[in-house]
Image (spheres, helix red, strand yellow):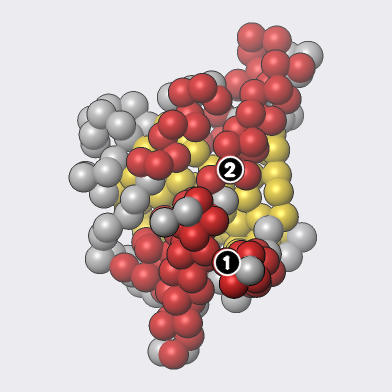
Amino acid sequence: MSAGGDLFQAAREAQFCERILAKSGENVLRATLTDAASVDAWSHYPPGDVFDPESGAQWYYHCHVPSVDGEHGHFHCFVRPQGAQGPVHHLVAVGVDAFGKLHRLFTVNRWVVGDTFLDADGTIPLLQRFDMQMARPSYLVNRWLTAILRLYETEIAELVRERDRVLAAHPSGSAVLDDRALEVTSSLAVDLAARTRVLEAATAG
């Protein structure tokens, strides 16, 4: 399959997951929070995060209360290439609105997630490792996240490169990774439906 075909397949899988959830009155966000007794800002959902021991992929969701610029919260996506006991590396955050629709992709400074920092050359090869094959909290949410990282892999790679450029140019110097004045290091608004239409037209052509 061509690269364009692979992207179209990822887009279709993400929309398939949304469609199946919608048939049951659910969406990506509701399915993630289904077992939560309450939803509190900055808490991890689900508690203890989601980790796939085969791929080393890991994620958790946390929200803003109230929503910020239409974003309810975001999924922080990581990879532990050496397994559960090894270092964890942040890849990207996937923001969604209050209806679970994809809103934006962004990177953050190290202090935000407390990961073991890798520069772009170390981080970008890990994007392909993010493959969530877990039943909980929702298999469809896990497949949706995997599809989003596949679909936007090129854009995420550029966000990671931009993160490094922002960090390198910051006046904090070597202390920048712990500088709480710098939180989001790069961001991109995205529209899954529009991206799917473009890929569908390109594939048909």
Crowd tier of the residue under label 1, counting other residues whose Cα lies within 10 Å: few below 14, some 14–19, many 20 or above? few
For the question of whether residue 78 can be seen, the reply is no
Q: Nearer the viewer, residue 56 or 36?
A: 56
157 vs 23, left or right, is: right
204 vs 136, left or right, is: right
Q: Residue furthest top?
A: 174
Q: Which mark is residue 194?
A: none
Name the spot of residue 38 as percent of width and height, x first. 46, 69
For the question of whether residue 118 can be seen, the reply is yes
Name the spot of residue 34 as percent of width and height, x first. 39, 74
**Would you name the residue on which mark 1 appears?**
203
The structure residue drawn at horizontal position 46% and vertical position 64%, both measured from the top left corner, is 9
Q: Which mark is residue 154?
A: 2
Measure how far apart labels 2 and 1 are at the Cα level.
18 Å
Tell me the quadrant of the picture where the N terminus can be found. bottom left
Q: Residue furthest front?
A: 205
- Residue type at mark 1 is Thr
Name the spot of residue 144 as percent of width and height, x first. 44, 64
The structure residue drawn at horizontal position 47% and vertical position 36%, both measured from the top left corner, is 90
